[in-house]
Amino acid sequence: MSPASWRAGVAPAPGDRACPGCGQVHPAARTEVVIGAEALDALVAWLDEHAWEHVVVVSDANTDEAVADTLSRRLATTRRRVTRCRFPERAGLAADEEATETARAALRAAGPDGALVAGSGTLNDITRFATHLESLDYLSVPTAASMDGYASSVAAMQFDGLKVSFSARAPLGIFADTRVLAAAPAEMTSWGLGDLLGKATARFDWLLSEAVTGEPYCPVIAEAVAAPLERCTRDPEGLLAGDEEGISTLAAGLVESGLAMAMAGSSRPASGSEHHCSHFWDLLAHRGLRGHAPHGLQVAHATAAILRLQLDALDRLEAGLSVPPGRRSTEEDRWLGESADSEQVEKVRREKAELWEAYAPRWPPPPSELADARRRLESASEGFPRVRSALRALGIPPDGSDRLGLQPFELDPETLEATLRFANRMRPRFSVLDLLESQGRLDTLARTTAEPRG
C-alpha cells in the first residue's frame, strides 16, 4: 500500500515465539494503525467492531480545531455518548501530575468504554498514563507527524522538572488522517523529522551497550526503526515542503518506531544519548535557566553533537575503562540544582556504578570480539552522512547554526558542554557519553564539540 494510505495491524509474530534475531520473546503488538484519508472511517468501524458506546475525547484548544470537534460531532451522529476532556492551553501544557489528575478525574466521572486522544506528544503521554492508572484502553488520533510516541507503551512524564518514563499501555489503535497531518504547522513536521533522525545515534548507543555491558540487542527491532529512517532521509527537503505523501511516510516511520519500542518493552530502540540531552534541557527549562523548546527540535540539535562524539568513540574504541561514570561534582550540582539530590538521579548514579563494576574489568574484550563490535558499529554509522544531510535541511549545518526550521533554538557553548558532560545523569541507560566518561575523555571532547564552528 502506498505511503499515503498505510496500514499496520497486529504484529505478525505471536508474543510467545522466540525472535529469530535475538532469541528473546517480545510482547506482541496489538495496535491497529491506519494512516490515510480514510482513517476516521476506519476509527468508526473499529468502535463498531469493539462495541465502544461511550468514549471520552481528550484534546486541547489547538487540537479541538484540528480534529477533535469534528470527530466528536461525527461520533455523536453514530448515537454514541461522547464526553469531552478539554485542556484550555494552546501552549505550555505539560505531561505532569496536575494534567494526569485532570484526565483521570474526567475518566472516573464518565466511566467510558475507553478514551480517544486527539493530539500529539504531550496529550498522548497524559492520556496514556491516565488510562493506564484507570485500567482503561484508548485510541490515538494524531494531529501532526511530530513525534514517535504514538504507539509507545511508555509514558514520558515530567515530574518535578525531571523527565521520567513509566510503563503504561500502548493504544489499541492509531488513526491518522493525512489531511490533518499535512495541515499541521510546518515546524511540527520538522520536529517529527528531528525525532526520527535521533534513531541513528540511538541505534549506535544500543549496539555500543551490547558490546561493552552485554545488554541484549535485537537486530530485528533495530531494523524496524532503521528502515523508515532511511526512507525519510532520501528527500528531507520534499518532506519538509509539506508534501502529503512525504508527511505520511514520516508519520508511518514515527509509528513504526513506537511499535518497535512496544515490542522491546522500553524506549531503548529509539532513544539514546540524544534523548538524554533533550531531557537535560527540559530540566534546565524547568529551573528557568533556558526557554522551553519542542522535544523533536531538541533531539535534532542533540543528534548533531552526539554524531561527532560517536565517531570519536569508534576511532578509539579499544581504550580501557578507568573512571566510573556519573561521579558527583560541584559543577554537576550547579547545573542539576535540587535534582542533584533527587531519588531519580541518585538511582541513576547507583545503577551506573554497579554496572561499571561489572563491565569495566572486561573491557576491551579479546581482539576478535573487539573487531566484531567495531564492524557492527561501523555498519550502524554508515547512514550518518545522510542524517547530517537531513539535519542541514532542518537548518543545522556543521558550522553550528542555531536555527531549526522556522523556530530559533538558543544553545550557548557553555550549556552544550555541560549537557554533554552531565546528560547521562538523566537515565541509567548506557550510552556513548558513559563510554567516553569511563575512558576519561568526555570532558575534553564535550569542550571541543561545544566550541563554535564556522
Image (spheres, rainbow, N blue to C red):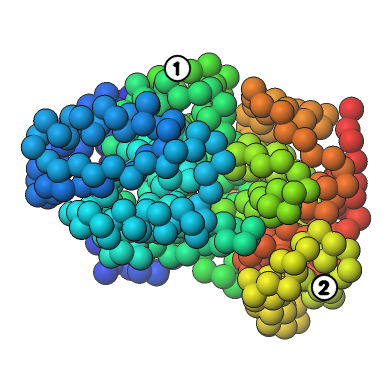
Q: Say whether residue 298 is visible.
A: yes
Residue for point 71% across, 28% down: 408
x then y, percent, for residue 84: 28, 42
Location of residue 367 (image quadrant): bottom right
Question: What residue did someone put label 1 on?
Answer: 243
The tally of labels here is 2
Foreground of the two, 250 or 299: 299
Considering only vertical position in the picture, is 177 above or below 129? above
**SS of the residue under disc 1:** loop
Foreground of the two, 192 or 411: 411
Mark 1–mark 2 CB contact (< 8 Å): no
Question: What residue did someone put label 2 on?
Answer: 328
- How many other residues sit within 10 Å of disc 2, few (<14), some (14-19) or many (≥20)? few
Residue for point 37% across, 26% down: 65
x then y, percent, for residue 344: 63, 71
Residue for point 20% across, 37% down: 43
x then y, percent, for residue 246: 44, 23
Amino acid carrying label 2: it is: Arg
Foreground of the two, 427 or 84: 84
Amino acid carrying label 1: it is: Asp
- On-image quarter of the C terminus: top right
**SS of the residue under disc 2:** loop
What's the distance in space between the residues labelled 1 and 2, CA to CA?
48 Å
Locate residue 140 relative to residue 269 in the image: left or right.
left
Q: Say whether residue 252 is visible.
A: no
Considering only vertical position in the picture, is 351 above or below 198? below
